Amino acid sequence: MTKNSSRTGYSTPAVFIAACAGMFFFGVAMLSLGPILGQLNQLVEGANKLPATMSIGIFLGTILFGPVVDRFGYKWLLIIGSVLELAGLQGVANLGSIGALHLSIFCLGLGGGILNGETNALVSDLYDDSRRGGRLGLLGAFYCIGALVWVLMNYFISDYRIPLNILSAVMAGFIVYYCFHRFPEKQASENVPATSMAGLLKSLPLILFALVLFFESGFEGAQSNFTILYLVQEGGLTAAVATLAMTWFTVGMMGGRFLLGKMMERLGSLKTLYVYLSVALAGVLMMFIRSSSPVPAYVSMVLIGFGVGATFPVILNYIGGAFQGRSGSAISIAIAIALIGQYTFNFLTGTLYDHGNYVSLPFLLSGAILVMMVLVPVSVRASKK
């Protein structure tokens, strides 16, 4: 069931559409630099440092959104996050100096971080325990759609400014959409104390759930950034074939998130998450297969993408249920810790690769899945005490 919106004046379907649009554009933001970084390097010197600026923006947006949402509600922060991302898209499309590009990418990351956290918290508050997980999975699928649309637009259109301007126009339309719809007002805690975040950091269930996301985000970061080189060095594939394999990862994740709601209805949250993580582990083990055909690599990426597609929605479902009234701040903390995990795994994997240890990647990924399998039931039990 959806939470009763008849007394609040907002339409749950309309608000859910708004959340999905925000997550779509976060998917665009996250992959914004990948397809166009080569072209930017040809235009300005120092473009390779832009991803670092993006990471700073996303982290700050993630930290900031939670307390603001818990105190003031969703509508205006959703608009602000979208305007920041729109400014970033237009800056990348129309500004040519390296300083202006850094500012644009920072705005893109800041807006994206706000949209990611806010849309998850918004959907968490829209639905009750019976539907929250499935709706969070569907929301996450729109991240995949946004990422795929951006990549495919740049594949078929050589001038990256055209996709940027098209998506900017669509985003401007959704900003107008947000202005004309009502959203949930302040959450249960009308006056969130300044010590709220500090208090949440002492919550064992939240820290345990956040640690699951630490390893999940670390897994996704290492897998996304280092798999192509692994497939080339250890799998014997060409760079073009290995790059195409990563598209199948996104397709697998999108499929997994579309099916997540049905799976949770039949199996429950915990069993569903174990099924998905087991599929991901099978996909990682397939990375050890050496073949002249790219098919094993493609199947492996589909299985991994499908398998990791459940972790964020299911864990955020648990957090939303356990911390009602403070879900924005709780999700903000959890995603921030997840981003630290991503940085940690990227640093560790990069260091191993610098020493030629390419084969370490599937071992690292397998280890992350096994740790999550141990942490999940411990986290769930702690949240019920």
Image (cartoon, helix red, strand yellow):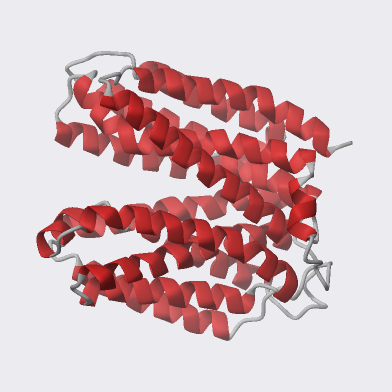
Quadrant placement of the N terminus: bottom right
Name the side, left or right, on which 177 lies relative to 198.
left
State the residue lying farthest toward the right: 385
Image height of 66 relative to 320, above or below = below
**Image quadrant in which you'd find residue 338:** top right
**Image quadrant in which you'd find residue 57:** bottom left
Name the side, left or right, on which 289 lies relative to 85.
left
Name the side, left or right, on which 332 lies relative to 242.
right
- How far across and down, in percent of the image, does residue 294 sit? 22, 24
- How far across and down, in percent of the image, does residue 68 sit? 67, 70
Residue 265 in view: no
Q: Residue at x 24, y 30 (%)?
A: 229
- How far across and down, in percent of the image, does residue 101 sit? 27, 68
Number of numbered markers? 0
Name the side, left or right, on which 279 lies relative to 167.
right
Q: Residue at x 79, y 60 (%)?
A: 195
Image height of 94 relative to 348, above or below = below
Q: Residue at x 49, y 84 (%)?
A: 176
Q: Nearest the camera: 266 or 171? A: 171
Q: Nearest the camera: 217 or 240? A: 217
Residue 186 in view: yes
Q: Nearest the camera: 125 or 118? A: 118
Q: Residue at x 12, y 61 (%)?
A: 158
Quadrant placement of the C terminus: top right
- How far across and down, in percent of the image, does residue 34 sit? 27, 51
